[in-house]
Image: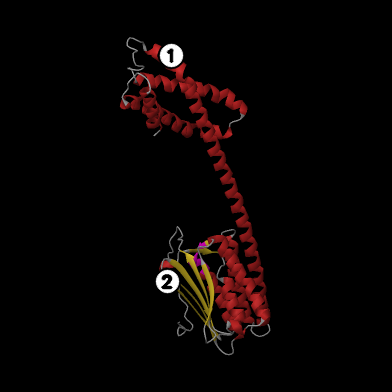
Amino acid sequence: MLGVLFAFQEYMTYRSTRYRMSYWTLLVPWCLHFFLWGIFCWIFWWKGRPFIERSTTKSTLLWFFPLSIFVSILEEAIWVACQPKIPIGSHGWTYLHRLQYFLDSELLDNLVIFWVTFCLFRVILSYQSFRERESAVAQQLTQAQLRALRMQLNPHFLFNTMNSVSSLMRSDIEAADQVLEQLSSMLRITLDRGEQQMIPLTEEVDFIQLYLSIQKTRFHGTVHHYVAIEPEVLDTLVPTMILQPIVENAYVHGVAKTVGEGFIGVEAQNHEGQLRICVRNSGKGLAQRSKAETAKERVGVANVKARLELHYGNAHCFELKEYADGEVQAILLLPLQYSTRQTDKTLEYAYDNPDHNR
């Protein structure tokens, strides 16, 4: 494009004088000129990028200034060698004579092209470096926020479970021992995950199965639960411990308030290209809960929403639905992101009360 524009400019200049020059005669040399500079700039970017980014005033004067003169002369030498008929009327001129002629008239222009390119590359590399540092800081901040949110979850869950064990010790020592074993398994899973923020859904559900088993023992079998996960979504990635506070809210603020038997269910499937997770529970409806219960529930819900916001931004949905019979559903719609490894097993579905389907 630059060759076309400069050739046109020179063509119009010739038209204003007594000389007549074909546009195509001017187009080829100009296009070749900028084609050569394009190759030099590509090599400059490819090989010299680290040196440009780290360049100082001293290194610029010692290395890049001599390089600019060398490249400018080399480009002109190649260009003159490819154009034996220029300048017009130079019949009988030697190659060195023609090269000297064009160096006298165009060396300064070549130096300007080199240094404009150098400054442009320096600005681009500085901007890229700034964006990378900004991204690294933002990622560190996000990780710190996620760790803080997870620290709010784990002690809260541990405190509630130990209270359950304390209650069982007075009535059923064998059940209390079983709960402690299950709790140790859950803590081992949590420790093994470390700082891992995203895990396959199957691992999250295994964790929830342990939690449900603990609560089943605590409620002496009066709470029925089921887990129904479509096999195709077993390897989708979800935030670590994203379901535990939802299931805990379902127990504490729903099932625990039920007179007689209750139920809780966890479902997951591919819903129109998104991962849909639904936690269902019987018990008090949302409107029947006291202000104190609502305030406590909001802590867990706010935590879940904050983590989803950090992980997905606006690319998710979380809502609570209430039905006339008091059933409450917590529904998550998340992007489908798959783990690189494939699950070797099919999740074992636990159906204690398969009649609860909506």
As drawn, is 342 to the left or to the right of 296?
Answer: left
Determine crowd level at label 1: few under 14, some 14-19, many 20+ residues with C-alpha closer than 10 A.
some
Amino acid on which the number 1 mark rests in the picture: Gln
Residue 230: mark: 2
As drawn, is 220 to the left or to the right of 9?
Answer: right
Amino acid on which the number 2 mark rests in the picture: Glu
For residue 165, what is the image quadrant?
bottom right
Q: State whether residue 238 is above or below residue 175.
A: above
Q: State whether residue 208 is above or below residue 147.
A: below
Q: Is disc 2 in contact with disc 1, using a CB cutoff of under 8 Å?
A: no
- Image spot of residue 45 (x, y percent): 48, 34
Highlighted range, magenta: 199-204
Determine crowd level at label 2: few under 14, some 14-19, many 20+ residues with C-alpha closer than 10 A.
few
Residue farthest toward the top in the current orientation of the protein:
92
Residue 100: mark: 1
Where the N terminus falls, by quadrant? top left
Residue at the location (47% across, 31% down)?
A: 44
Where the C terminus falls, by quadrant? bottom left
- Image spot of residue 176 (x, y percent): 63, 79
Residue farthest toward the bottom in the current orientation of the protein:
260
| Nearer to us: label 2 or label 1 | 1
Q: CA distance from mark 2 to mark 1?
A: 77 Å
Does the image show residue 122?
Answer: yes
- Image spot of residue 151 (x, y percent): 65, 64
Q: Secondary structure at mark 1?
A: helix
Residue at the location (45% across, 31% down)?
A: 43
